[in-house]
Image: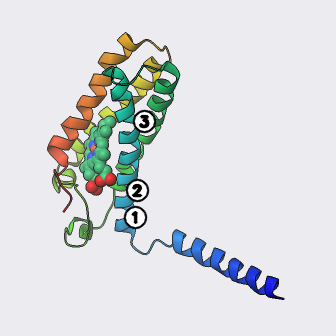
Amino acid sequence: MLKLVKMSIAGLLAVGISTSVLAAEDPIHDAIEYRKGAFSGIAWNFKRMAGMVKGEIPFNAEEFAKRAGYVATLAQLPLEGFKDLPDSAMDKSKTKTAAKPEIWKDWADFEKDMKALEDGSAKLAEVAKKGDLDAIKPVFAEVGKTCKGCHDEFKEKHEH
Ligand code: HEC
């Protein structure tokens, strides 16, 4: 009997948890978390690749190629987290974001910068498969420039 009660409580909890996880009560919050999550995943892998490029971490071709592949995939995600949001997404009192309003004013530019990251990281994943660090270095630097270029223009130094 006790066992049954325990099981049904566990069952209820499981259902409760899954519905609250899936509920999109605040789509703007979800979009911001989504794009930040994608960028965090990119940065995690990018930093470790940077360590290898700079010689701070021993170069491991297989690991580098794996991380470059992750970044190439993740680079396709953030744009969706900026797209088609209601105007209230710009209300800084409601959202915790470092995204500048210029993103939506200069949308074509922003999209171009995002595409540069996508294309650059795809190229990096391709060259990384060959495992030649000297060939990797200039392509890696190119991708790094796309991060900085976009952040300088479209990202606040701190969240607001
Ligand atoms: C096309 C523009 C663009 C490119 C390219 C770009 N970023 Fe960003 N990044 C942003 C914006 C905008 C934010 C702020 C997102 C927010 O707070 O809503 C951001 C946020 C971040 C964050 C903070 C995430 C968080 O949890 O708050 C990290 C880390 C980051 N970017 C790393 C990178 C790295 C590394 C690259 C290059 C490999 C890169 N970004 C390329 C625009 C860009």
**Ligand 1 is within 8 Å of the C-beta of the residue at disc 1:** no
**Ligand 1 is within 8 Å of the C-beta of the residue at disc 3:** yes
Whether label 1 touches label 2, CB < 8 Å? yes
Q: Position of residue 71 (x, y in %)?
A: 42, 36
Q: Which residue is mark 2?
A: 34
> Which type of secondary structure does the marked residue at label 2 adopt?
helix
Q: Earlier in the sequence, mark 1 or mark 3?
A: 1
Q: Position of residue 69 (x, y in %)?
A: 48, 31
Q: Residue 30's mark?
A: 1
| Quadrant where the image shows the N terminus | bottom right
Q: Is residue 111 visible?
A: no
Q: Residues within 10 Å of mark 1 (few under 14, many from 20)?
A: some
- Give the CA separation, mark 3 to mark 2: 15 Å
Q: Which residue is mark 3?
A: 71
Foreground pick, 8 / 147: 8
Q: Amino acid at mark 2?
A: Tyr
Q: Position of residue 24 (x, y in %)?
A: 46, 71
Q: Amino acid at mark 3?
A: Val
Q: Position of residue 118 (x, y in %)?
A: 37, 34
Q: Residue at x 24, y 44 (%)?
A: 110
Q: Is 134 situated above or below 47?
A: above
Q: Residue 50's mark?
A: none
Q: Residues within 10 Å of mark 2 (few under 14, many from 20)?
A: some
Q: Quadrant of residue 83?
A: bottom left
Q: Is residue 113 visible?
A: yes
| Quadrant where the image shows the C terminus | bottom left
- Give the CA separation, mark 1 to mark 3: 21 Å
